[in-house]
Image (cartoon, rainbow, N blue to C red):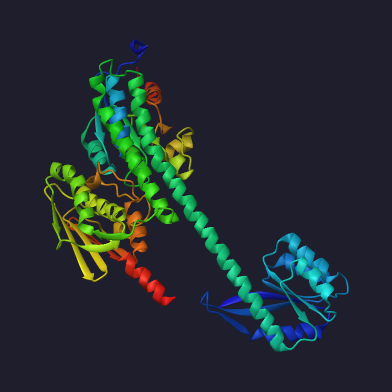
Amino acid sequence: MTTLKVLAIDDEPGMRRGVVKTLKRFSVELRELDITVGFEVAEAENGSEALEALEANAFDIVLLDYKLPDINGLEILNKIKEKKYDLLTIMMTAYASLEVAVSATKNGAFDFLAKPFSPDELRAVTRKAASALMLLRHARKLDEEKKQIRFQFLSVLAHELKAPLNAIQGYLDIMDDRIAGDDIEKYDKMIKRSLIRINGMRKLIFDLLDLTRIESGKKKRDIREIDILDAAHSAIESVAPLAKERNITVNLNAEPPVQFQGDIGEFEIVFNNLVSNAVKYNKEGGKVDIDITKTDDDTVEIKVADTGIGMNEEQLSKLFREFVRFKNEKTRGVEGSGLGLSILQRIAKLYNGDVKVESEEDAGTTFTFTAKSAETQADNKEQST
Amino acid sequence: MRDEKIRYDGKRALLVDDDIDFLEQHKFGLESIGFDVITAESQADAEKLIDTERYDIAVLDLMMENEDSGFVLAYKSKKNNPDTPVIIATSVTNETGMKFDAVTEESRDWVKADIMLDKNLRFEQLERAINTLLPK
């Protein structure tokens, strides 16, 4: 249970006692946040005592009498605003007039209680304040987390772009200084490495564009009847040279055609990522099996299994984080942006599907991508609204 | 200008980094001033070389499979060959904001490196560091 601290500011002891008694055993259940809130009440009998208490402790809700012996309630309200205390104020006054209400609201009061009030009235207004306060704080926290994630993404991205730039600059510096003399052939390996790093950067930038387009919803989707196998074939074709070089067989198991309502471009991205990963992280002479099945009329399941280096538990737990790439003896020389799986997850979400992974170290990895036909999703939506 | 360079023919350098481009570039540079260069791409491989190979200077990356790989290697190298100079090249300050150096006696006591260099260093910087550490 979360306990909110309430400060009851009133010069009438009876009134303060009433507040303490009413709120002591009162609690509010906030279903949206799945929490229960209880209250703890402190008292102040005049304005200066109240200001001291506010300065010394963090309160959440203030019950403030408008008419205090030393300082006017509105002045206290002003102080609260000035000091930017993170709390809500409920004004209590026997002189409830429209004028007081307007000026208090202008000064940041959350609500009113007209004296005399019943315990139920006090509970109702307290419930309202507690709920507003907790929702506000929750929203603020989410916003902060979002900012943190974006910041982290950008700083990792900057690092990922800086690394190849540094490498290329290093090579160019050596060539600029003609450290190996004037014969260009002496620099062959450096030129090749520079080109590899440039390609890696290009891939990173393209993946980043895919990711942001999908995420922002700006990418225009071209949904129509497609044959998923077309996307599979084109991915197999583009990975063929690398597969051949490493003596890896790529098998496609499916009953043609596999008809589906979707965007062929999105499925090309899916297959390109899954199949190229299965080849890149495979072993010399290994195997890649692509199984495409319709599990029902509008759901397709794409399974890509390799006989590669696999992953251990720790690696699996980090796999879907952005820019995560495992660096070890076995992944040496494997290029990639570290964004592929994030992109797949975004695409799966567009089709109400998901991406699952199973892996055994040194034995292989199987990715399962499921998607629901875009048309049936639209139908469902229409039916449900 | 190149003719005035100090040559290290017949001397061996141990170069350790998990970034193959860094390795490639500095191996090239070291060879251009006469070094015979042995390389390792991981802390594990480097440990084997430290135990079995003879070398006159070590140039180590700090963060490899472990965040303190370079410190561990420097410690082992100094234990085996106390007189062989060790240079640690690192981007740790860039990546973590932590700053290590080997300037004071106190820091050199636990950072077993003679010189710490910030990446990205141009080969000339590494060369200058070597010139101050190796006897002419």
Q: Nearer the viewer, residue B102 or A285?
A: A285
Q: Quadrant of the C terminus of chain B?
A: top left
Left or right: residue A365 versus residue A7 is: left
Q: Residue at coordinates 59% horizontally, 81% vertically from top-left?
A: A28
Left or right: residue A280 versus residue B70 is: left
Q: Nearer the viewer, residue A315 or A267?
A: A267
Q: Residue at coordinates 88% horizontally, 74% vertically from top-left?
A: A69
Is residue B65 positioned above or below A59 on the image?
above
Is residue A237 positioned above or below A119 on the image?
above
Is residue A84 positioned above or below B112 on the image?
below
Count of picture labels: 0
Q: Quadrant of the N terminus of chain B?
A: top left
Which quadrant of the view contains residue A302? bottom left
Q: Residue at coordinates 31% horizontally, 28% vertically from top-left?
A: B25
- Residue A94 horizontal/vertical position (percent): 84, 81
Which quadrant of the view contains residue A224? bottom left
Residue farthest to the front, as pictured: A224
- Residue A25 horizontal/vertical position (percent): 64, 86
